[in-house]
Image (cartoon, rainbow, N blue to C red):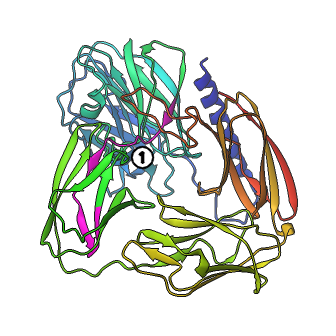
Amino acid sequence: MSYIKKMLGLLFFALMVLALWQCARRGSPTGGPKDVTPPQLVRAEPENFTTNFKETKIRLYFDELIKLQDVQKQLVVSPPFKNAAEISPQGLPSKYIELVIKDTLRENTTYTINFGQSIQDNNEGNPNSFLTYVFSTGEYIDSLSVAGAVKDAYNKKPDEFISVMLYELDSTYTDSTIYKNPPLYITNTGDSLPFFELKNLKAGKYALFAINDVNKNNKFDQRQDKIGFVTDTITIPTDSVYLLNLFKEIPDYKASVPSLAAKNKIIFGYQGDYKEMQIAPLTELADSVRTTILKDREKDTLHFWFTPTKLDSILFTVTNERLGSIDTFTVKTRDLPMDTLQVTASARGKFNIEDTFSILANTPIAEIDTSKIALKVSDSVPMAYSQVLDTLKNKIDFDFEALPNQKYSFSLLPGAITDFFGMQNDTLDYNLSTGSLADYGNLRITLGGEVSYPVIVQLTNEKGEVKRELKATESQIFAFINLEPGKYIVRVILDENGNGQWDTGSYLEKRQPEKISYLPGTIEIRPNWDQEETFILTN
């Protein structure tokens, strides 16, 4: 018995035990036991597993009234139909469903129609899980299979209903086939379990993919879909069980049409990597017009800032020399207000002594006058600090020795910050207070097993937002000090190229994403508590 069949058998047993336990729980009388029995298929026309199939209509009959739930989302036909089958009745209870085939079927091919959990009883909604109808246009039913699981390369929880596809490696197959044509065989994972099994396959050599098919067109759209792939050829029959890592590629570079966002700002959107993107005005600007470019902190957008001009329009070229890409755009000016300097702080009030206090601006910061910036502790005592201007994120990071149970105040007099347009801040005051060390908890993590350095160890909240991270090039204890109480998830990134960040994969470059491992469960950090964890990594 293969590994996947063992796992499915254990899963079935666990579900049966859970169902029996649910039925055996005590409760108040409800007038009789709840119906938990799914509708049963009693007859099919033509019969299931029919060979030499030549019909255009299939009817399935059940032992009770049924309804269809999300059938177009859950129905999986392998090989896929070019034109969606017509399924009825929808919206009305019935003891049968009818499927009308709109395609010309392939010769000598086994077809599998999987209804997922779309067929439910009319009263309680109990699904007939993954009912499958199989037929062949040839003399026999293909009976081989391949199985495995799909995980998300970055997120702890995998996506639901991931399409798993097999492409036959025939004379027409190329690396671009998945962008243009549907696969020969297809199935999907469920809404809670990441396992898959492709059945009724013929022997041969295949390429195996997983795609979260946003458009439901059985093709890979790089700009929307995640993809996972097995690098090696899949030879069927096989006893191997396959694991696919699903990841979102960095999309191919593309410049978007720019637009005037303010009297002094034009936004240039893009897709892909912006680092070799160059923006240059072809229109001759007056000597008095100054320009600078900043990347948006969050969006895939570059901000082209310029001192106001009376030109009716400006012609730009946007180039990417590495790709040999040159785009030309015209931006028409119009009467819009200017973006003026606005300053915000990274924190107010409660402040964790491990955090960095930052001041952020919406327009490009040009100058900092530290003589107009004062940091005081306990409302009156001057305190030393240092500052760094982060030109990439357009913010000022302040470094000072924050101690427990203290109050700090930053005061910025007018002119402390001057932006690219000569605008200056008004008087600004920010008050911070630190708690007692007893308000926080500490976590120390030791890595073991199959660890290769460098690594990045991150703590996230349950939404996946990174709260802390530590990087290391050699074995050490990862000490996360003074953590806010709460639940944390631990993940370890094997930073193969040593660039200090997680790197996604590329299908065309046959590059898998960098590996991420999650410590099972969550860790609850309590106030005034030290906790130690050992995380054994495995391949």
Instruction: State the image coordinates of residue 227 (x, y, percent, origin top left).
Output: 41, 36
The boundaries of the magenta stretch are 244-267
Residue picked out by circle 1: 119
The N terminus, quarter of image:
top right
Compared to residue 273, the image places residue 337 above or below, namely below
Quadrant location of residue 402?
Answer: bottom right
Residue 444 in view (yes/no): yes
Give the camera-side residue of 9 and 177. Answer: 177
What residue is drawn where x is 54% and y is 42%? 502
Compared to residue 25, the image places residue 192 above or below, namely above
Is 433 magenta? The answer is no
Number of disc labels: 1
Instruction: State the image coordinates of residue 219 (x, y, percent, origin top left).
Output: 30, 36
Residue 202 in view (yes/no): no
Give the camera-side residue of 167 and 335. Answer: 335
SS for dot 1 = strand
Quadrant location of residue 25?
Answer: bottom right
